[in-house]
Amino acid sequence: MELKSIKGDIPKELYEILEKEITKLRPAQEKSVKKGLLQGRNLLVCTPTASGKTLIAELAALKSIIGGKGKAVYIVPLKALASEKYRDFKRKYGNVAKIALSIGNIDSADPFLAEYDLIITTSEKLDSLIRHHAPWLTNIKTIVVDEIHLLNDTERGPTLEILITILKKLLKNAQIIGLSATIGNAEELAEWLDAELVVDDWRPVKLHKGIYIDGKIEFY
């Protein structure tokens, strides 16, 4: 699918940024568009690493922000990953959206976030913001949950599950985008999220499997 085929479905400012970097959408991105990404549908995207999942989230978030519909939160499991996403998004979208990083003291309500459009945070920090009754939370229109398979993690899973449950009740009209490379029960999770399931095995570099022994690799 050519990028220009969605030109009429996304804000002009967003299209002008994207056309500098890409001309075609990757398979998972095309499937997401066809399943209602740009019409506000919830999506659970299960595709390999480097297959283009982040752009799917960016399309939803930036369309909402630039279109004046509401804020977006991008939830990641680790502070280091949050910092990386913040740098990437700031570089790419800093001229069309106010982007903030919130990974600090979980006892702070971070009132300054009311002035920002795209907020990158961890599940623990967002859980704290909810408990502090941050008033801007009701302005969230897009919720992105990166590495959503960590719902099954013994340490982070319970917090993430409770967080998503609360957000679903608090923000009934928000679009939820779940991203993961691998999920064992994708259909079940998609049903829980009330989301369309997007599954694809395309990757930019073909993956070969083999066994290394005595200095040689035998591929199979």
Image (cartoon, helix red, strand yellow):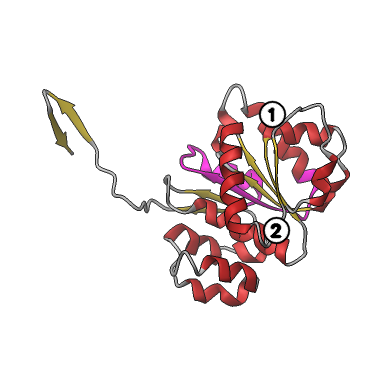
Q: Measuring 82% from the left and 30% from the top, which residue is drawn there?
A: 108
Q: Which residues are magenta?
A: 168-195
Q: Could you say where residue 164 lies in the image, as x and y percent from the top left? A: 70, 39
Mark 2 is surrounded, within 10 Å at the Cα level, by few (under 14), some (14 to 19) or many (20 or more) other residues, namely some
Say above or below: 131 vs 173: above
The residue wearing badge 1 is: 159
Q: Is residue 26 left or right of residue 94?
A: left
Q: Is residue 78 visible?
A: no
Q: Identify the element where label 2 is drawn.
A: loop
Tell which of 134 and 160 is nearer to you.
Answer: 134
Kind of residue sitting beneath label 2: Ala
Q: Measuring 80% from the left and 35% from the top, which residue is drawn there?
A: 129
Q: Could you say where residue 127 lies in the image, as x and y percent from the top left? A: 76, 33
Q: Nearer the viewer, mark 2 or mark 1?
A: 2
Quadrant holding the C terminus: top left
Identify the disc placed on residue 113. none
Splitting the image into 4 quarters, where does residue 78 fall? Answer: top right
Q: Measuring 62% from the left and 47% from the top, which residue is drawn there?
A: 191
Q: Identify the element where label 1 is drawn.
A: helix
Q: Is residue 66 visible?
A: yes
Q: Would residue 172 be counted in the magenta stretch? A: yes
Q: Earlier in the sequence, mark 2 or mark 1?
A: 2
Q: Would residue 147 be counted in the magenta stretch? A: no
Tell which of 95 and 157 is nearer to you.
Answer: 95
The residue wearing badge 2 is: 97
Quadrant holding the N terminus: bottom left
Q: Is residue 220 left or right of residue 68?
A: left
Kind of residue sitting beneath label 1: Thr
Are dots 2 and 1 in contact, CB under 8 Å? no
Q: Could you say where residue 177 lies in the image, as x and y percent from the top left? A: 62, 50
